[in-house]
Image (cartoon, rainbow, N blue to C red):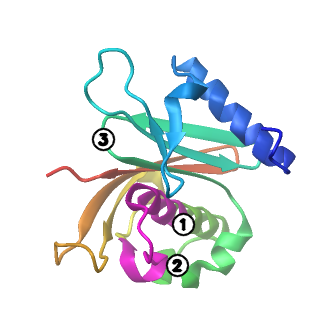
Amino acid sequence: LETMKSESHQKGFLAVRMLLQHIDYSDFDLFYDEFGKPHLKPQGCSIKDVEISISHSNDFSAIAISDSKVGLDLEQLKEKALRIAKRFMDVSHLENLSEEEKIKKATVVWGIKESIFKIKNEKGISFPNHIFEDDFSFEDKKATATLKFNNNPEVSGEKFQIQFDSVEDYIFVCAFEDIK
């Protein structure tokens, strides 16, 4: 904690530890692999690994715990997401929306791509070139997406199920590998 220069990083670090305590894990149960991806040690008699994903945005921190691979992204709604949307998404998905709806949808799409990247965590994955969101309605709070990456053995790509929601001016996005 003391080696972290930013107060924001310190707060995020402490918030994650508090969230872990809330679900009966300790700081000693959390570790990071060589790529910086977080993992949880199995608890007690658990024979199945527990997956974790962590995200921070400004004054909020969140964790997702699952028995399947999970990626979580938390983003504050900002106009910047819309300004750079053409760099990471199919902007035709923003047609016929109000300015506010465009910002929300662009933020969800960024979260989709970020959360899938957190699951796969492979060098070289490009948001615009490898992760493709299917068009979705914000009201549904769910979507699907596909990862088409050169190391992928399936020509059609890997499928992901997405759940998302908004709280105040934040978007939470959770991705799960589509189990066949």
As drawn, 32 above or below 41: below
Write down the residue under mark 2.
88
Of 115 and 165, nearer the camera is 115
User: In the rendered picture of this protein, how many numbered marks are placed on residues?
Assistant: 3
Q: Earlier in the sequence, mark 2 or mark 1?
A: 2
Distance from disc 2 to disc 1, alpha carbons, whole Å, reads: 7 Å
Please name the amino acid that badge 1 sits on. Answer: Trp
Extent of the magenta region: 109-132
What's the residue at 72%, 41% (across, down)? 12
Residue 19 in percent (x, y) is at 61, 27
**Element at badge 3?**
loop
Rendered view: 55 above or below 81: above
Task: Give percent across and percent down for residue 104.
Answer: 60, 62
Instruction: Decide which of 33, 93 is in the foreground and name it.
Output: 33
Element under disc 2: loop
Up the image or down, 10 lies above or below 147; here it is above
Q: Amino acid at mark 3?
A: Ser
Residue position for label 3: 68
Q: Are marks 2 and 1 in contact (CB under 8 Å)?
A: yes
Local crowd at mark 3 within 10 Å, few (<14), some, or many (≥20)?
some
Mark 3–mark 2 Cα distance, whole angstroms, equals 26 Å
Mark number, residue 110:
1
